[in-house]
Amino acid sequence: MSTLVIKDLHVAIDGKEILKGVNLTINTNEIHAVMGPNGTGKSTLASAIMGHPKYEVTSGSVELDGEDVLAMEVDERAQAGLFLAMQYPSEITGVTNADFLRSAINARRAEGDEISLMKFIRELDSKMEFLEMDVDMAQRYLNEGFSGGEKKRNEILQLMMLQPKFAILDEIDSGLDIDALKVVSKGINEMRGEGFGSLIITHYQRLLNYITPDHVHVMMQGRVVKSGGPELAHKLEAQGYDWIKEELGIEDETVGQEA
Amino acid sequence: MTVETKLALTEQDIRSFSEGKQEPSWMTELRLKAFGELETLPMPTPDKTKITNWNFTEFPTHTVESNAYASLDELPEEVKVLVHAKEQKNIYIQHNNTPAFTSLSEALQAKGVILTDIYTAMRDHSELVQKYFMTDGVKVNEHKLTALHATLLNGGVFVYVPKNVVVEEPIQVIYLHDDSDASLFNHTLLVAEENSVVTYVENYLSTVEHANGQANIVSEVIVKDNAKVTFGTVDVLAEGFTTYVNRRGVTSRDAVLEWALGMMNDSDTISENVTHLVGDNSEGHVKMVVVGRGKQKQNFTTKVIHWGKHTEGQILKHGVMKDEASSIFNGIGKIEFGATKSNAEQTSRVLMLSEKARGDANPILLIDEDDVTAGHAASVGRVDPLQLYYLMSRGISQQEAERLVIHGFLAPVVNELPIEGVKKQLTEVIERKVR
């Protein structure tokens, strides 16, 4: 079993503090959902864990099985077993999806132990079929000209090809129609099990109809303010966030406000 | 300070050299006339690059003797990888200044195709060469460097494709430079007669680290009515040369000329690539990639001049600059009065990999006719940190991520090169240069 421990994480962007002490522990074989209204720091948490160049961790720690994640370069974090399905994946001209994926897989393997082309194509084909993707997507330039839904599927394709220990999914459901949402969920459920943990960031309960989380957390004002089981998500769906704000005496849940 | 431009060679040296090569008298006269004009002709003035202190005239020796090759098996390994020995029937290899190997398939010979070194061409096809040599394309007295080229010409190739002949396999020319003291005053003359089709790739390859000589290179491409020429190059000349390279095309009616230019020199380089779209309805397309490194200074002027009606000119240039390299990319679309319904398009993009690298893209449209269309796009930027972050978040190292982004950036031109071995070489050179 692997464990990702986030302790008292403070993060700033352009000098402005966004996260103000986030605590979370995620084990493999667990799915955690982080919910909350817009502007409460959810995506910042995802980006800071992966090492986005714009986000500055001012204090706190992130450890993966005792290793200091924050001391690692972005690629080392990925090599250690972290994956972030991004809300806005970059487009890269001239680099095909297939070439990119093969480079990413081989980056995890020792020199001389690169994946064979045949094996790679077999795996890629079967996973693309599973995600109901057009075969020509493999030869298209990475994310270039992809629709919103295609980009999200492509993120899940990468997740399935790379098999990380922990996947953070940053609003993977935003902008998806119901069919695409089902396919994306199918991919994540396929990964579910021993050796895989996930942190799903969303502000819609909808995604959680397809992926049942083990734990649900609510973020407000740059902190986790409430945690519970899957029933918490249902309560949020039915009643919204106001009851939590009342319970905690929060007037404005966005970052920059104090309780 | 202005560098001494006087040549160490005398008029008598030029005459003896020409006679030693048994050149026709018109060529000897042409050389001597050019020599006489050297002092008075001005230097070229490439836009935005000051070359008054560049040394284009000093070199250790005019010609070096190198060995010829009896077969392609004798080629050095670096050259062998460029040649598909079993399939490449049409090839000329020049070893420094020595014509070293020539082969042309019997089928093409029977059709009247000519592929031969420039000296043999001047002897055996004197009238044909005289008709096109520095007449319609590059003029001897354009400026000091063209006159210097004519005076000192010491190598090159002549390619002639007769009317209605379609050359299916690419013609390949390799200029191998492996003697530090060699200078290259090479002249490529390619003539494609009416309705002919040919693909030609020339490859400048230094296998020595440093050059003490000069590279003053001219390629002229004459494309007659309804002919189509694809002209590819990969230039990999060593640091130490002062390279002047002038590649010029002239198209007649309905002709198409496509350039795919891989400019990978490590030397300071002035490159002038001009296409004259003379005939109505003719087309010129230029695709160019450049990688600059070290303290290299380069200037790439690409010009398409529309004379004929309904002519189509397209320029696409992508450059990568690293270390302290600097490059000027001048793209000029010129539409002359009367060239109605013509279209001039150009795109220049420069990617800078380091703080001290410099890149400058200057799109210029000069239009003397109303009834035309034209457009340009230019950008100069750095590798997008978010692209790198995205690639690295999948476990790809920063170095590999940069490699992928750069390859992607240059791919549109690399993919155009018509010979697989040369395309592979260009990819490898790019990899070596950007590492």
Image (spheres, helix red, strand yellow):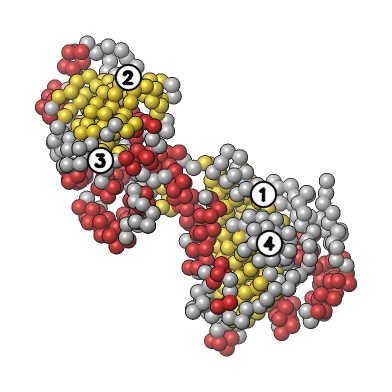
Q: Amino acid at mark 3?
A: Lys
Are both tags, 1 and 4, on one chain? yes
Considering only vertical position in the picture, is B368 above or below B232? above
Q: Is residue A178 left or right of residue A162?
A: left
Compute the Cα span from label 1 to label 3.
Answer: 49 Å
Compute the Cα span from label 4 to label 3.
Answer: 57 Å
Neighbor class of circle 4 (other Cα within 10 Å; few <14, some 14-19, many 20+) is many
Could you tell me residue B159's position as x and y percent? Answer: 63, 76
Q: Chain of mark 3?
A: A
Helix, strand or loop under label 2: strand
Q: Amino acid at mark 2?
A: Lys
Compute the Cα span from label 3 to label 2.
Answer: 26 Å
The residue closer to the viewer here, B168 or B327, is: B327
Q: Nearer the viewer, mark 3 or mark 2?
A: 3
Quadrant of the snapshot with the C terminus of chain A: top left
Quadrant of the snapshot with the N terminus of chain A: top left
Considering only vertical position in the picture, is A127 above or below B354? below
Are both tags, 1 and 3, on one chain? no
Q: Residue at x 73, y 59 (%)?
A: B212
Could you tell me residue A14's position as x and y percent? Answer: 44, 24
Mark 1 lies on residue = B297
Q: Amino acid at mark 4?
A: Asn
Compute the Cα span from label 1 to label 4.
Answer: 17 Å
Q: Is residue A127 left or right of residue B136?
A: left
Q: Does the image show residue B195? A: no
Q: Is residue B421 left or right of residue A79?
A: right
Q: Nearer the viewer, mark 1 or mark 4?
A: 1
The residue closer to the viewer here, A30 or B220, is: A30
Q: Amino acid at mark 1?
A: Lys
Helix, strand or loop under label 3: loop
